[in-house]
Image (cartoon, rainbow, N blue to C red):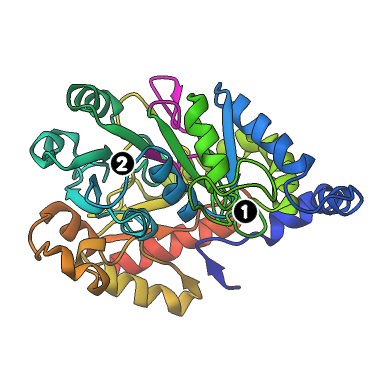
Amino acid sequence: MSTYVWQYLDEYRAERADILDAVETVFDSGRLVLGESVAGFEREFAAYHGLPYCTGVDNGTNALVLGLRALGVGPGDEVVTVSNTAAPTVVAIDAVGATPVFVDVREDDHLMDTAQLRSAITPRTRCLLPVHLYGQSVDMAPVLELAAEHGLKVLEDCAQAHGARRHGRLVGTFGGAAAFSFYPTKVLGAYGDGGAVVTADEETDARLRRLRYYGMQERYYVVETPGHNSRLDEVQAEILRRKLRRLDAYIAGRRAVAERYRQGLGDVPDLVLPRVAEGNDHVYYVHVVRHPDRDRILKALTAYDIHLNISYPWPVHTMTGFAHLGVGKGALPVTERLAGEIFSLPMYPSLRPDEQDRVIGALREVIAAG
């Protein structure tokens, strides 16, 4: 039996009737683009966050791109973020013509080291972009304080943290806007690509709606500011409406998987399990662990037909596509050290206990054999 970090088939079998009914609902509606399913999901996702506005878009990367543009970020600006993230965070900054500026992450929870933010701010800084990584929140208090002090925008990258909270407050409700991805692996995942931007500001939402539709205020109208074709698909929106009702159950399932890992692996030498930062409620988008012998462990596990991955093996600042930034090796020592030790264990709500036990047993054997 092959085991991977993520699969959707068991969940699909359990939810098949509802998923197919969602597809049928759209096909029977007479409206295949920007219809009631998108509008309904936008209302419901905004309401989940206690916010008035949500704009559905075609993917999480464009949620970031449009979010940045709607906040007024563009050429000549700098955006402060982290390198220990999925590449789309930084690709989006580059796409609007801005320059990413990196701060390091914390050793214990891998989140943005907000103590480094002040030294990263320059006269060109326009936006702070915290990444709520792996399923838990960045410490937002210093982010918001510095933003207010320097007149900066804050765009939250919530692609990995649907439903996560800090001191009881949902991520996505702190900044001027927040970008979400609904890629299938996410805590709230579609059956294809999808994304959204939420905000409390009416004008920001109006800009987002123009930007996702070529820059037009209305269909077949006048382009006010050149935009994109970045509409959330009706079928994906209707599926997301159904799955949103189960989001809290998905999170509970992920937490149960994390607890089984804690019980089964908590005493393994040199294996560092995820640490939940004080004040955070973790939703475990991925279950990232650390071990100094990571590469040997991953190779050995393939003999058990267990295939794991790394989130993320290459810090963004070390990628050839961003060599022009001139951020040399050694500039972000914690990020670079983590990249050589971290790997992800299987994590999804439908992971059966017996499958997880097989992973736990194999991992214990492989580490002990080292």
Q: Which callout, 1 or 2, points at the residue further toward the start of the chain?
A: 2
The residue where tag 1 is placed is 352
The N terminus: image quadrant: bottom right
Of the numbered discs in the image, which one, if any, rests on residue 129?
A: 2
Q: Of 58 and 238, which appears nearest the observer?
A: 58
- Please say if 293 is above or below 94: below
Q: Which residue does the image show at 32% across and 44% down from the upper left?
A: 73
Return the x and y of residue 4 as percentages of the image width and height: 52, 66
**Quarter containing the C terminus:** bottom left
Who's the residue at 57% across and 50% down the image?
A: 182
**Would you call the spot at circle 1 few (<14 residues within 10 Å), some (14-19), or many (20 or more)?**
few
Give the amino acid at mark 2. Leu
Is residue 279 in view from this perspective?
yes
Mark 2 closeness class: few <14, some 14–19, many ≥20 residues within 10 Å: many
Q: Amino acid at mark 1?
A: Arg
Q: Which residues are magenta?
A: 156-174
